[in-house]
Image (cartoon, helix red, strand yellow):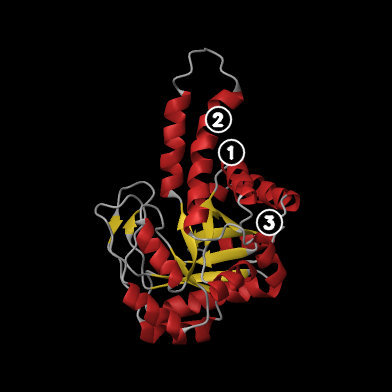
């Protein structure tokens, strides 16, 4: 069943677990994420990036996700990840996304507020939840051509930001980074505790890939309710691709080609769901929605 980001995170906030948020590009990824989540009886967030939604991506990704959500008996949020364009926010709302993220984290505070509030004004009248980012989660871009340092979220800004924008979830910077880590991160849990105490809005961790499990558990125990994963998905699928390439047949069957990729990805998704303690939470999340 399709639910909003606000609904899927409400129970997580109250009961100190987090919901896994996984980027999907096409059917192999979407089906693997949803089937694994259902097997784990876990709520799940499937995400698309604007670059992957261009052209027919809006129809294929959003259309497949909405149709699949009707089939599965778990809470599913269809979420637009890292968007910098209000026109794209409007497109996501039009195509049935139930959550959108406007990322103004690289903007000055006041401009971030104004642009995020504009995104809220587009989404909320249609019942669509909005995630924003305060502070800045750095790391590498998808092409690994740029590396940006993180800027930690300030506790004294968070209450004002939430009040002025009306956002439903907030990505915070506590020491994670996007892409493959250059060195092992050390999360600032003391800062996270301050942020959690400053707002009732569910907090989000970007850069969940590669963050040590013990630090992820600690972050979830102290207020993180959504953890984004994409880099580790790509790593897992590449392992599967290399395994599939060993097939000694000129015309391998599709299930033999995609099977190892799905297997590696499913194992990762299952591990993340258990790490976040969202396994077995599907029915309770639905009841609380």
Q: CA distance from mark 2 to mark 3?
A: 25 Å
41 or 289: which is nearer to us? 41
Q: Earlier in the sequence, mark 3 or mark 1?
A: 1
Residue 269 shown left or right of residue 125 in the figure: left
Residue 198 shown left or right of residue 56 in the figure: left
Label 1: how many residues lie within 10 Å, few (<14), some (14-19) or many (20+)? some
Name the residue beneath numbered marker 3. 74
Q: Residue at x 45, y 67 (%)?
A: 220
Residue 242 shown left or right of residue 129 in the figure: left
Q: Are marks 2 and 3 in contact (CB under 8 Å)?
A: no
Label 3: how many residues lie within 10 Å, few (<14), some (14-19) or many (20+)? many
Q: Residue at x 53, y 36 (%)?
A: 263
Tag 1, which secondary structure?
helix
14 or 143: which is nearer to us? 14
Q: How many marks?
A: 3
142 versus 133 height, above or below:
above
Q: Are marks 2 and 1 in contact (CB under 8 Å)?
A: yes
Name the residue beneath numbered marker 2. 258
Tag 3, which secondary structure?
loop
Mark sitting on residue 28: 1
Tag 2, which secondary structure?
helix
In this view of the protein, can residue 49 be seen by the observer? no
Q: Earlier in the sequence, mark 2 or mark 1?
A: 1
Q: Residue at x 48, y 45 (%)?
A: 268
Label 2: how many residues lie within 10 Å, few (<14), some (14-19) or many (20+)? some
């Amino acid at each position: 069943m399709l639910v909003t980001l606000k609904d899927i995170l409400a129970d997580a906030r109250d009961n100190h677990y987090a919901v896994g948020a996984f980027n999907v590009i096409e059917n192999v990824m979407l089906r693997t994420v949803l089937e694994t989540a259902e097997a784990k009886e876990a709520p799940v967030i499937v995400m698309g990036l604007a670059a992957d939604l261009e052209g027919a991506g809006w129809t294929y990704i959003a259309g497949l996700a909405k149709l699949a959500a009707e089939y599965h008996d778990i809470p599913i949020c269809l979420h637009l990840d890292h968007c910098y364009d209000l026109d794209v926010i409007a497109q996501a709302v039009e195509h049935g996304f139930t959550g959108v993220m406007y990322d103004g984290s690289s903007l000055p505070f006041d401009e971030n507020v104004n642009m995020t509030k504009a995104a809220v004004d587009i989404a909320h009248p249609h019942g669509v939840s909005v995630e924003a980012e305060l502070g800045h989660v750095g790391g590498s871009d998808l092409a690994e051509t740029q590396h940006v340092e993180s800027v930690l979220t300030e506790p004294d800004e968070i209450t004002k930001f939430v009040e002025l924008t009306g956002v439903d979830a907030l990505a915070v910077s506590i020491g994670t980074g996007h892409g493959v880590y250059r060195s092992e991160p050390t999360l600032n849990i003391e800062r996270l505790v301050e942020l959690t105490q400053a707002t009732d809005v569910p907090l989000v961790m970007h850069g969940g890939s590669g963050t040590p499990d013990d630090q992820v558990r600690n972050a979830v125990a102290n207020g993180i309710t959504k953890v984004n994963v994409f880099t580790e998905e790509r790593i897992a699928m590449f392992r599967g691709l290399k395994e599939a390439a060993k097939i000694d047949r000129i015309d391998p069957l599709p299930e033999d080609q995609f099977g190892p990729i799905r297997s590696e990805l499913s194992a990762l998704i299952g591990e993340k769901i258990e790490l976040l303690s969202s396994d077995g939470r599907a029915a309770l999340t639905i009841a609380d929605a």
